[in-house]
Image (cartoon, helix red, strand yellow):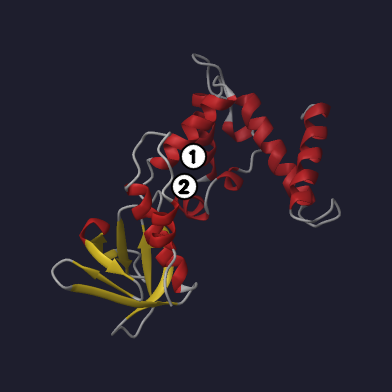
Amino acid sequence: MIPKKETQYAKWKAACILASKGKTMAYSSYRTEVRNIQSFLQMKNLAPPSGQAAPDLDSMEMNAECFVSPRYVKKYKTKQLTARILEAHQNIAQLSLMEAKMRFIQAWQSLPEFGINYYIVRFRGSKKDEVLGVSYNRLIRIDMSTGLPVTTWRFSNMKQWNVAIEFDQNIQVAFSCQSCDCKVVHEFIGGYIFLSTRSKDQNETLDEELFHKLTGGQE
């Protein structure tokens, strides 16, 4: 049985979520939003303090699928997901809001693909679309069908870039962007290179001229 206050909170938060998307409580997903929030609140209440026995997972009414990506739903059973979610929640249940946020940021930054932006491109000489990953220190050519990296180019070896990119050892990379304006990729590369030139001193004066030179791009 969910307490009345938690039910009211779930309805209020669900309404706010829909309102942020320009929708009202009459929208079809309102009840689903309410149930998802109630499931989360129930998960929080049932997470046991340290040293106590875990709750009966079979008796819980929690939609674990709402808290993980589809690939994990296919990989694990609902009972396994519920147990993992409760375990993860128990690890942060006693943290303050700021500490929990910092823990989330640290976990996010530890992911293998953290900081990589992906674009669909067509490399010169190729007849198929591929994925270009732009990271803070490198470009990654990725096979779209397998998701595996094919080639990696480090910014430290880059001589210049515009429509084509030239690296050391006379390596030139040219491509056309299929998912965005090519200038967007140029700005990302320039922005990352600019950040790499900055020191950790927060009082360092911003070199606006260099920033615009690196990110401005040319047609």
- The alpha-carbon separation of the residues under discs 1 and 2 comes to 6 Å
Residue 153 percent coordinates (x, y): 24, 62
The residue sitting at 77% across, 37% down in the picture is: 10
Q: Amino acid at mark 2?
A: Tyr
Q: Amino acid at mark 1?
A: Gln
Position of the N terminus by quadrant: top right
Left or right position of 72 against 201: right
For label 1, the crowd category at 10 Å Cα-Cα, with few meaning under 14, some 14 to 19 and many 20 or more, is: few
Q: Determine the image quadrant of residue 119.
A: bottom left
Residue 47 percent coordinates (x, y): 58, 25
- On screen, residue 1 above or below 66: above
- On screen, residue 24 above or below 83: below
Q: Secondary structure at mark 2?
A: loop
Q: Is there any visible trace of residue 151 in the rendered image?
A: no
Q: Secondary structure at mark 1?
A: helix
Q: Which mark is residue 14?
A: none
Left or right position of 56 against 192: right
Left or right position of 134 against 16: left
Q: Which residue is mark 1?
A: 80
Q: Determine the image quadrant of residue 46.
A: top right
For label 2, the crowd category at 10 Å Cα-Cα, with few meaning under 14, some 14 to 19 and many 20 or more, is: few
Number of numbered discs on residues: 2
Residue 60 percent coordinates (x, y): 64, 34
Q: Which residue is mark 2?
A: 76
Q: Is there any visible trace of residue 124 in the rendered image?
A: yes
Pointers 1 and 2 in contact (CB under 8 A)?
yes
The residue sitting at 53% across, 28% down in the picture is: 100
The residue sitting at 42% across, 41% down in the picture is: 205
Instruction: Please name whichever residue, 45 or 55, is drawn nearer the observer in this view of the structure.
Output: 45
Residue 189 percent coordinates (x, y): 37, 60
